[in-house]
Image (cartoon, rainbow, N blue to C red):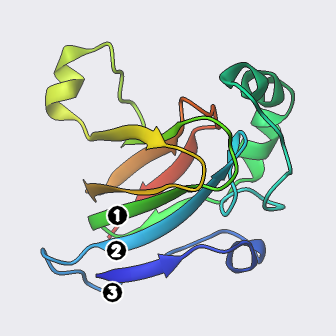
Amino acid sequence: MKKVLLTTASLAAGAFALGVASVSAEEAQVIELTQTACQFVEIEAGGDHGYTSNSKADCDTINAESGAERLASAKVLNLKPGKYIFRVTNKNVPYDLGFWVREHDYDWRNPLHKLSKTSVSGGGLSTGTTKDYEVTLEAGEYIYSCPLNPTPDYKIVVEG
């Protein structure tokens, strides 16, 4: 298993690109992400914005004020096709979080999308908990977010 640790320093220099050497069918690239209130820290310009939230409604308010601007300056994950494990940690949010990665045009209301498009999600991330979400990504565009700790829909581009 290969591991990539995303840090604010590694992202601060400009657009983020993960160069993944060829990954065998048994190997998965690990991408570590940290959730704080209303955001994923490593991917946003400026790192942890220090938001506080006691509920989904707090993040809805914060994102209404700053979400579009934050998303515009967020780093894009540029990946190669392959198997990935998104290792997500709830650093300090006082309620359960989750993680959801899906194709950019995935619509959960469309039953055909559930059969034909990539979507991996899960919850149960209590404060201080880390969980793994495994997904195989083919060439295309994807987004990821947390619907329980509303974050912007961050972008992944898979090429190669």
Identify the mark at residue 29; answer none if there is no mark. Answer: 2
Q: Where residue 130 appears, x then y in whole percent? A: 47, 58
Q: Quadrant of the N terminus?
A: bottom left
Pick whichever of labels 1 and 3 is earlier in the sequence: 3
Q: Nearer the viewer, mark 2 or mark 3?
A: 2
From the image, tell me which residue sits under label 1: 85
Q: Nearer the viewer, residue 4 or 137?
A: 4
Label 2 sits on a secondary structure element that is strand
Q: Quadrant of the C terminus?
A: bottom left
Q: Nearer the viewer, residue 28 or 70?
A: 28
Q: CA distance from mark 2 to mark 3?
A: 10 Å
Query: What's under tag 2, amino acid-wise?
Result: Gln
Label 1 sits on a secondary structure element that is strand
Q: Where residue 107 appears, x then y in whole percent? A: 36, 21
Q: CA distance from mark 1 to mark 2?
A: 6 Å
Q: CA distance from mark 1 to mark 3?
A: 16 Å
Res. 103 visible in picture: no
Res. 96 visible in picture: yes
**Label 3 neighbour load within 10 Å: few <14, some 14-19, many 20+:** few
Label 1 close to label 2 by CB (< 8 Å)? yes
Identify the mark at residue 21; answer none if there is no mark. Answer: 3
Q: Where residue 138 appears, x then y in whole percent? A: 26, 56
Query: What's under tag 3, amino acid-wise?
Result: Ala
Q: Does residue 112 appear to the left or right of 61 in the view shown?
A: left
